[in-house]
Amino acid sequence: MSKTPEELFAAEQKQADIDHHVPTAGAMVNHIVSNFTVLDAKLHQTTWYVKGLSAPAIRQVYQALIEDNRRHYDEVGELLLDENEKPSSTTAEYSEYSMIGENGKNKYFSADEMVSETVQDFVTQNLFVDRAIKLAEKENRPALRSYMEQLRGDDNHAIRVLQGLVGNAAGDGLEEDDEDDD
């Protein structure tokens, strides 16, 4: 007898809760999928509301970041499916699992503050990417590890470009506080 959609989803949610309390690579990558969704909204917010002489250059950079973010979202979702995982796919899951915060007041930030906020979002994302790399290595999941390593490089590039927009070197003023020393 086959299970109903309700039963299947309940089982998925139960497993997700277990995976997030004893972190697995799949659960960590699901945080990243959720972060992509919130980051998409934040990148658009900056594109729509940035003002000042630097606004055209910032919009151009952010359009590229939006394209990259959406590509990563799609590729990571497919990768999770390939790895027999279930990527988050509802706004409720994105809200629960995203570790990137959003706030309507950010649209009133100066251009430099908006860019600095985005830099911090990529730093936060990298905390989860680094954890996913370690967990994928531990779980012998080479495809997942490889993609996460590439994502780390792409995030580092985005940080450098964004930092340059506000006159900083790539690592200026960044703190990566990873309290979980797996």
Image: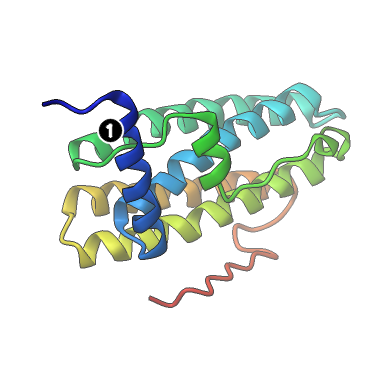
Amino acid carrying mark 1 in the image: Leu
**Percent from the top left, x then y, of residue 133?**
32, 60
Q: As rendered, which of 182 and 51 lies closer to the eye?
A: 182
Q: Is residue 57 visible?
A: no
Q: Is residue 29 above or below residue 40?
A: below
Secondary structure of the residue carrying tag 1 is helix
Q: How many marks?
A: 1
Residue at 87%, 40% in the rendered image: 110
Can you identify the residue that label 1 sits on? 8
**Percent from the top left, x then y, of residue 140?**
15, 61
**Percent from the top left, x then y, of residue 4?**
26, 25
Q: Is residue 100 left or right of residue 27?
A: right
Residue at 30%, 38% in the rendered image: 86
Name the colour scheme. rainbow
Q: Is residue 52 visible?
A: yes
Q: Is residue 132 left or right of residue 175?
A: left
Residue at 61%, 47% in the rendered image: 100
Residue at 66%, 26% in the rendered image: 44
Instruction: Please identify the quadrant where the C terminus is shown.
Output: bottom left
Instruction: Please identify the quadrant where the N terminus is shown.
Output: top left
